[in-house]
Amino acid sequence: MSGGDTRVKEKGLFRAFLGAGERTVAAAFAKLAELDDVAKAVDTRLHLLHARVDLPAEDGSGFWRFLSLGEDIFVVLTDCSFAGVRHEHVVAEGLVEFHFLLEGPVALNLPQADDATAPASISLMACQQAFGMAYDVVCQPGACKMASLYVRPALLEGSFGLAAAGGAVRQLLHPADGTMAMIEQKIDLEFLRVLRDLFGIGFEAARDLPLAMARIVELLTLSADAIDRGSRAKEESIVFTARELAMFKRAQEILATDFSETLTIPQLAKKLGTNATKLKGGFRLLYGTTIFAYRNRYRMDRAMELLVAGALSIAEVSQAVGFRHQASFTSAFRAHFGVTPKQARQRVAGAER
């Protein structure tokens, strides 16, 4: 960046990384216009902008792509592998958010044209909080590839046919004071085709910007149709209060430290004073993963610490991280680290000789 770069050095996501003073999406895009060494392309006739910002090598690898269609649609494509935990505080700015999330630290495994199956882990999550509400997003180390669209509600109502929608969609477009509304929908192969095409654009050819615009409009059309169908089927949105959003920090702490085999999602929800649906949906939104995957990561990291320390047998380590049977622990450990607990201990012992 240039000598006048004022970006905040906090290990955050794109808002904090760009140093947008208001920490909003609109402010982040405005900041892009001030940075003179960021690759940008602008089409003034179609009101399109594209910019790519690379993640510094010390923070990991990869980049963010930023696309805007006028002042009504902002798109952020994340294709990064983060070296550490990233944290960001998100304030309300009157935009409906559409997020296409993946499970775990893996690349966006979008199917090829001849692939007839859709990864079950990918879903559409749409949300908006009322003004005055805020929440925290945490991204764990590892690969993160996702598409996020931020859209003004009036555009969704006027151009995407949601003006007459009721129920869950109405709550999403106009959240009540002191609440945040969220809708989650599974996506089908049509979504995946558009996502694959959008991530595949190189932004080098003359027509890449209008091509990206076409894919973004198509993705929004599919999203509006999906949430409208859900609303007509009487599906309810998930509504969070400020207290419920704050409780996810407590949920995170419990999952990272309590490895009891008897801890279930309903039990955790009761302990936190909420229900399982809100707990699972909110956790996916704020942490980009499932409760099981998040807890498993910490269980396996703790198991590795105990194996390296060498004071406990493998069976005792298994019990310490909540496994009743050593065979189940070995399978889970190998799936996570690629080696068995015995092999991990042997490698550590060999390295110390």
Image (cartoon, rainbow, N blue to C red):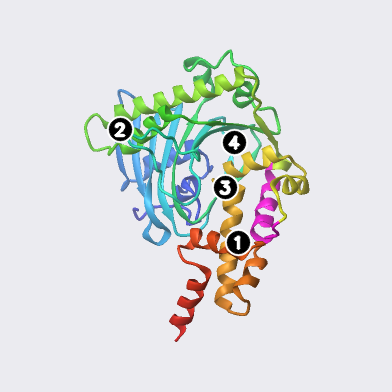
**Secondary structure of residue under mark 4:** loop
Asked whether disc 4 touches disc 1, contact meaning CB atoms under 8 Å apart, the reply is no
Residue at image position (77%, 49%) is 271
Q: Residue furthest top?
A: 164
User: What's the amino acid at mark 4?
Assistant: Ala
**Earlier-in-chain disc, 2 versus 3:** 2
User: What's the amino acid at mark 1?
Assistant: Arg
- In the rendered image of this protein, does residue 29 appear above or below residue 345? above
**Earlier-in-chain disc, 2 versus 1:** 2
The residue indicated by pointer 2 is 42
Q: Is residue 27 left or right of residue 273?
A: left
Q: Which mark is residue 287?
A: 3
The residue indicated by pointer 1 is 299
Q: Is residue 198 visible?
A: yes
Provide the residue span drawn in magenta.
245-261
Spatial separation of the CA atoms under disc 2 and disc 4? 27 Å
Spatial separation of the CA atoms under disc 4 and disc 1? 34 Å
Q: Which mark is residue 146?
A: none
Neighbour tally class for label 4: few under 14, some 14-19, many 20 plus, Cα within 10 Å: some
User: What's the amino acid at mark 3?
Assistant: Tyr
